[in-house]
Image: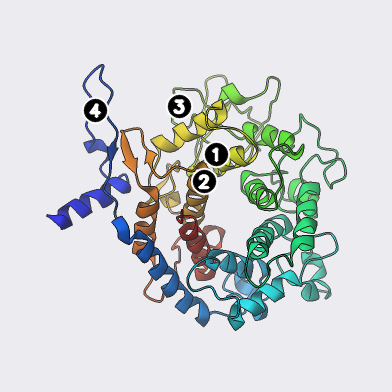
Amino acid sequence: MKTTIFAAAVLLSLGCVKQQAQAPAMGAKAAPQVLQSLAGPDAAAQREAQFENAWKFLQTVYGKQGTPQKQMADAGWGPKSGMIAYTALILQGLHGSKVWDDNNAMIKESVEFIVANQDASGAFHLFPLEFLGTEHGKAMKGLRAVYTTSIVAQLMADLNAAGAWKGKLRQKIELARDYLKQSQVGNPSGPAADYKRDSTGFGGWAYSKEEIDTAVNKNKKPPANMSTSTFAIDALKACGVGSDDPIWKDALTFLKRNQNAGEVQEEGFKTTTGDGKNIKPAGPDSQDYGGAIYSENSSMVEERTENEDGSVTLHSYGTMTYNLLRAYLFAGLKKDDLPVKLALGWIRKNYVLDKVPGYRNPKQFDQGLFYYYESLARTMKALGEDTLEDDRGFKHEWRAELIAQLGKLQKEDGSWINANPKWQEDSPTLATAYALDALRHTRK
């Protein structure tokens, strides 16, 4: 009997038996049903066991160098890996767990390696400064610097609060904060000062302030996107930037333009897709209503809706919708503000853990899956809710369900890896870092 109940709970948590949920009688409102916790009181123990197994794996790839053939995605972590971002992500995921030890040589050397690689502008780059000073490395300066600086800034904020590095990183945190603020698209003193309020990308963040010209004019990428922007917003929040800071006004302009709902769009703003189609936000009768896209004029969902008037509606998906909701909260919006309610409404209709919701093509279901888990956990913790009630009236104990799901996916060697190579999640180092960060945000 216990096995049967457990199996049913697993299926419900993954959205596999959605069609079996019974509708309430006409005119009656169904009382929320709380699903039994998949892990019960043992959820914390299961989480720590996953950390311990992951730590065993991580020790085997400490110092592993990546290969150019795989764009360094097969690298490990630590000083000898040459990967600032991977190393910071791993440390961030481990921090606060029982395996963390300030005096552990691997951890201590990795922290020292990272904090020593901040440049004069306050930025951290994908690769160490020594390499960037070489003839080959000069061309890579600034590569993904907003991403990397955002990750490191959050790590430093954690380290600066307690332990061996307490109070020692304040100046470096402030430098990183100022670099990120200046990197906002449209900042008068930044690299994209010519982007005005009616410009696509205004108020968001690009891959880095050094890359924006090449990204837009050569590679035809958006000047800002929801992923990079949310990393930056997470970091600014961690660095102590309050919700009354002027930076959030422009950030909110960008965030609302990436929400798939006409009600939150400001009158007069228009943008087009890469093939010149006018973009029309989703309406209340659309399954994409309230969710988020990747940028004002693009979505990672392959399909789009072609409207009768010649416009197109881009499709919302889970990772960016969770990112959007968290960014709204950090930018000062409240739970009863319309943009927040719409985003949460989309999430309640699309809560699943076995795939990234929003994708229509099964080949995309696991695209960026571990990043999705990280985004979900960070957002639910920021929301401050122990349960998430879906549109069927079920209350999900999201912490226990996510811990159980990650436990199912952890490999025997302690790593996580995505069979879908999109966005380098076929790297066990990166996928494991995302999984650990998701797990640490299941702590209350």
* Local secondary structure at mark 4: loop
In front here: 412 or 443?
Answer: 443
* Local secondary structure at mark 1: helix
Answer whether residue 124 is visible to the viewer in this image: no
- The reply to whether dot 1 and dot 2 touch (C-beta < 8 Å) is yes
Q: Residues within 10 Å of mark 1 (few under 14, many from 20)?
A: many
Q: Residue at x 44, y 67 (%)?
A: 416
In front here: 150 or 31?
Answer: 31
* Local secondary structure at mark 2: helix
In front here: 427 or 187?
Answer: 187
Q: Which residue is mark 3?
A: 286
- The reply to whether dot 3 and dot 1 touch (C-beta < 8 Å) is no
Q: Residue at x 41, y 36 (%)?
A: 348
Residue 96 location, x and y as percent? 53, 65
Q: 8 above or below 27?
A: below
- Mark before the other along the chain sequence, 3 or 2: 3
Q: Which residue is mark 4?
A: 23
Residue 325 has which mark?
A: 1
Q: Which residue is mark 2?
A: 379
